[in-house]
Image (spheres, grey):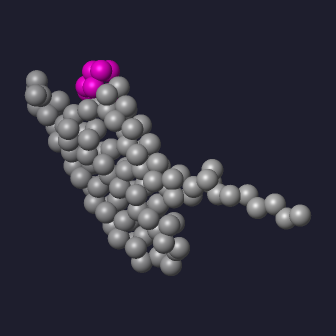
Amino acid sequence: MAENLEELDQHIRACIAIFVALLCLTVITVAVSYLNLPVPATITLALCVALVKGSLVVSYFMHLVSEKKLILWSLSLTVIFFIILMVLPVVTDLDVISHTITVKH
């Protein structure tokens, strides 16, 4: 908790700045949906904005900015496994290895 009024004022200003940033990113997310981009590009762009919004919420409102290294390492490991689990269906859908190679004589 804040020790004095100046520290409390800085904390309130940071929360307001994060709120404004989240509000702007939400407007950007809605604007992306109205762009005439291909569907994969729209989804990728919207997910990137959502990733930034999520990291702001986790960092400031869940106080991970000031946490110890062990928590940050476990969070990083979780993100790595999440990415692997998201990429795995795409790789198996491509199924490059099991395609038969036809040789014409």
Quarter of the figure with residue 100: bottom right
**Which sits in the foreground, 57 or 24?**
57
* Quadrant location of the C terminus in the rendered image: bottom right
Highlighted magenta segment, given as a residue range: 66-72
How many labels sit on residues? 0
34 over 76 or under it: above or below: below
Outermost residue, front side: 105
**Which sits in the foreground, 74 or 1?**
74
How far across and how far down the image is residue 96, in percent?
Answer: 62, 54
**Which sits in the foreground, 95 or 36?**
95
Write the residue at 32% across / 51% down.
53
Write the residue at 33% across / 67% down.
27
- Predominant secondary structure, magenta span: helix
Quarter of the figure with residue 47: bottom left
83 over 37 or under it: above or below: above
27 over 76 or under it: above or below: below
How far across and how far down the image is residue 66, in percent?
Answer: 26, 27
Write the residue at 12% across / 28% down.
2
- Let me know if residue 99 appears in the view: yes
Quarter of the figure with residue 46: bottom left
* Quadrant location of the N terminus in the rendered image: top left
How far across and how far down the image is residue 93, in percent?
Answer: 51, 58
Write the residue at 35% across / 25% down.
73
- Let me know if residue 14 appears in the view: no
Q: Give yes or no for residue 88 being in the magenta stretch.
A: no
How far across and how far down the image is residue 103, in percent?
Answer: 81, 60
